[in-house]
Image (cartoon, rainbow, N blue to C red):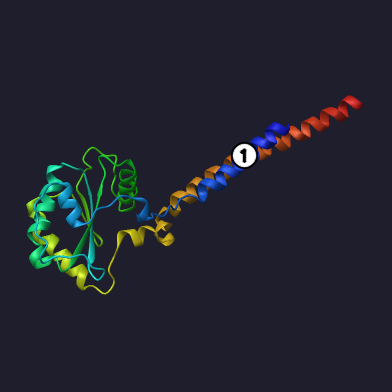
Amino acid sequence: MKKIIYLTIAIFCSFCFLTNSQATSIDKSNYNSLNLEETLADEQIEASFSNYEESKDKITIYMFRGKGCDFCRAFLNYLNSITNDYGKYFNLESYEVWNDKNNSNMLNTIAEFLGYNPYSSNFGVPFIIIGNKVFPGYNESFDEEIKKTIVNLYNSKEKYDIFVEVNKETKYEKNSDLSGYNGLIWNFIFTGLSTIIIIISINIKFNKLTEKH
């Protein structure tokens, strides 16, 4: 009887843990990132930074990449080519995911938050985020849209930042329907187990009374 009670308590505690662990924040300081200059150097891309420097007043382009990825290098070469005219608008923050499991896990979290399935066969790198605009991959047809997105984000009053947004608890309200559904299931299970315990307890007491008489 005691074992059943302890099992019920354990299941109930697990339910509480699961329903309160839906939202997980991301602390960027726990991940390995490179700026534009470091990223180009890592990919052995020659660059001149006479007209480019990092600054806090610029917007951030987030790039998830694989070292040696041809499409990633193509995007980096493109960024390198526009630094003279557009470098005043942006910083780059890149996260290598092929050789860094921690960064890869973060990409999965970010992608799912944005509505992408990181486990699908057509999901890959580069995965580029500029404000609330996502470029899943890269080809030259994106060039004009990338420049437009950079300038629009720089000039906007409210500069959307994916890491700020993913850390807002209110953003996880989109999962509330699923959480509520899971909660109903666990409540049903817990109620059922509780009912079984009560019935068993009553039967045990009834049998003891019967044996006395």
**Residue 38 screen position, x and y as percent:** 20, 53
Looking at the rendered structure, the secondary structure element under dot 1 is helix
Residue at (26, 61) in percent of width and height: 132
With 190 as the anchor, is 99 left or right in this view?
A: left
**How many marks are shown on the rendered structure?**
1
Snapshot quadrant of residue 102: top left
Check the picture and name the quadrant holding the N terminus. top right
Check the picture and name the quadrant holding the C terminus. top right
Residue at (44, 49) in percent of width and height: 178
Taking depth in this image into account, of 9 and 74 the one nearest to the observer is 74
Query: Which amino acid does the dot numbered 1 rest on?
Result: Ala
- Residue, disc 1: 10
**Residue 45 screen position, x and y as percent:** 10, 50
Which residue extends farthest right?
A: 213
With 31 as the anchor, is 68 left or right in this view?
A: left
- Residue 49, compared with residue 126, is above or below; it is below
Q: Residues within 10 Å of mark 1 (few under 14, many from 20)?
A: few
With 96 as the anchor, is 12 left or right in this view?
A: right
Taking depth in this image into account, of 107 and 68 the one nearest to the observer is 68
**Residue 130 screen position, x and y as percent:** 22, 60
- Residue 127, compared with residue 52, is above or below; it is above
Residue at (46, 50) in percent of width and height: 22
